[in-house]
Each structure stands twice: as structure tokens, then as C-alpha cells.
Image (cartoon, rainbow, N blue to C red):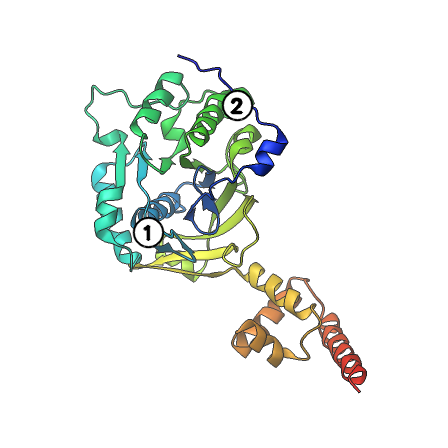
Amino acid sequence: MTNYTFRIPCIGEILDHEFLPRGDLVTPWLKEGESALIYAAPGVGKSMFALSLALAVAGGGKYLDWEAPRPYRVLFVDGEMPMDTIKERTELLLKALPGIDQELIRQNLHVFARQYQDASVIFPNLATIEGQNELESQADGFDLVILDNLSTLANVEDENASKAFQPIVGFLMRMKQLGQACILIHHSGKRASTYRGSSMLATTFEVILGLEKLTGLKAAHGTAFQIKWDKLRAKPDERIKSWEVWLDADRWEFEAAASEEVDILLEALRSGKYLNQKELAEALKWDPSKVTRTKEKAIATGAITLKDWGLAFGRAKDARSCVTKEDF
């Protein structure tokens, strides 16, 4: 039965009320009751990425430069993978995520997979009210629900029509009302620079991030991608970077993307605090050779000219000289 008993407090009541802080599921970018969209082209590694997040949250552990401060109950909903594939990937990723309590994972992470059901079972379709109600029922008691992926979990007739996504958005908003966090995995569009379908899908998410396939030596590992942040409501944090990520045998590796490192270097340079590359390297805690390589990338891409690089150090010297004179 529909409940129309609404709560509509005045702003004074809101200001006087002490709201309990919502815990972090993935520090620093996903809190309790929030939702995220993760998209990528087929074969880039979005399911490996999503399953790694599920394991880290369920075990109260760390993935890349992020962590789950404590363990949470996670429901991983899969629309296409056979259960033996999920088992193989989980065994691999458990080795790649050292330090996570595997006993907690065995208890806290549950898998609701289409391919594991009897042939007579109708798996929930997220594009219908009946399917949403069934999934809501199955997700009861879980803190995080990961939906992998939209194309296999919802029969959407026209992904370019905003009306087609209204039921999906409605379900995600309902999960927020219930205080359950949700991560939706989706495919990228033809250009791979954004997700597939109507922009209406973006309305409810606190976080939207894309995984773009890496090329070169890192791509030889198979699962290798760059993380691109399209939307983020969390506070700025040094752990939210454009990371380059690859799975090296049984170990996740990551480093800031070249473009990210150029931005970091130029921000430090333009702060006017450092007189030379040695001081820059010490401040950034980089090897001097890394400063040189990143400087060359910045010049090669037109982010800065060699002349402006030198002028920045000159201004820093002038500023420090003025401060020194004022002290006497």
C-alpha cells in the first residue's frame, strides 16, 4: 500500500537537527546511500573493476588508493557471466587484493547471477516494476548493490530516449530512500568518451567514472585502463586522480596518468614557492628524473613553454628575495 504520509520539515528544524554522519563505503568517493555509474567499452575490464570493489568493501580492505574503512554487506548482481567464471575471477582478485579479510568476504559478499538460476526462473528485469520490486526484495539487508551490467539486467527498447530510463532512475532513487548504495555498470557509447544512452541516466548519481582502455606495454597485461572522472560530488581529494591501472599477473598496479602528473607538476611550479627543479622534486617527493620527464611531456603537449618554465622559477626567486629583504 502506498504511503503518502510525507515529512516536510521547516529549514529551522533541519538546521537544529543533528544528522548522523554517513559512513564511507569507498573512501573517498562513495558513502552510504549514494550511487555511482561506471562505464567502459566491452573487454576493457569493468567487471574486474566492479568485482574488486565488491571484494574490498565486503572485506573492509583496500583497492588501488581507496579503502573501505569497515566491512559492509554487498550484493553483486550479474546478468551474463557463468558462475564458474565468477569463481575464477574472484580467486584471481583475492590474490591481487592482499590484506583483505577473506573470511569476512565469504560471509559478506553474495552473488545473484542470472546464469546460476534454473531455466524456469525469470530473472528480474530492472526496466519493469515487477523486476525492480523483486530485486529490492533480494537486496534487503545489503549495504551496497552492484549491478553488472545495465544492458543485461534491463530490457530498454531505445537507450537514446530519456523516457526509457525513467524506470531505472526511479529504482536508483528508491534505493537511496532505503539507504542502500548502488553501483551501476554500463557500456560506453560509440565514441567511448561517455556512457551509452540518454543523459537522463546521469541525474541520480553522485559519481560517474569511465574506464578507457590503455595502449602500449601496460595493455599487454590484458586488463589495463585509465580512470576518467566525469562527475563527483565528494570533496576534492588527492586519491581522486586520473589513474592508469593494470592487472599484472596477480597484482593490481596503478599510477597517476601522464596528464594528471603534468597538472600536478605545473600547479606546484606556478605556486611560486620553488626556485628550481630540485626543490620541486623534494616538495612533490618525486625522483628528479621524473620531474624532468614530466616537464618534457608538458612542453611537448603545449601545456607550458620552456620560456614560461624558466620565468616561473624567476618569479619565485624574486618573491623569496622580497621576503628576505622585509626581514631586515
Q: Nearer the viewer, residue 179 or 10?
A: 10
Q: CA separation, marks 2 and 1?
A: 35 Å
Does 35 sit above or below residue 219? Answer: above
Mark 2, secondary structure of its residue? loop
Give the quarter of the figure containing the C terminus. Answer: bottom right
User: Which amino acid lies under the numbered mark 1 shown in the image of this protein?
Assistant: Gly
Q: Is residue 42 left or right of residue 84?
A: right
Residue 116, image quadrant: top left
Viewer-nearest of discs 2 and 1: 2
Where is residue 304 shown, x and y percent of the image?
Answer: 70, 65
Q: Earlier in the sequence, mark 2 or mark 1?
A: 2
Q: Residue furthest top?
A: 1
Q: Is residue 204 left or right of residue 245?
A: right
Q: Residue at x 33, y 54 (%)?
A: 61
Does 293 sit above or below residue 111? Answer: below
Does 103 sit above or below residue 266? Answer: above
Q: Residue at x 41, y 36 (%)?
A: 182
Q: Which mark is residue 7?
A: 2
Mark 2 crowd level (few <14, some 14–19, many ≥20, 10 Å Cα): few
Q: Residue at x 37, y 54 (%)?
A: 63
Q: Which mark is residue 60?
A: 1
Mark 1 crowd level (few <14, some 14–19, many ≥20, 10 Å Cα): many
State whether residue 161 appears in this view.
no
State whether residue 53 appears in this view.
yes
User: Which amino acid lies under the numbered mark 2 shown in the image of this protein?
Assistant: Arg
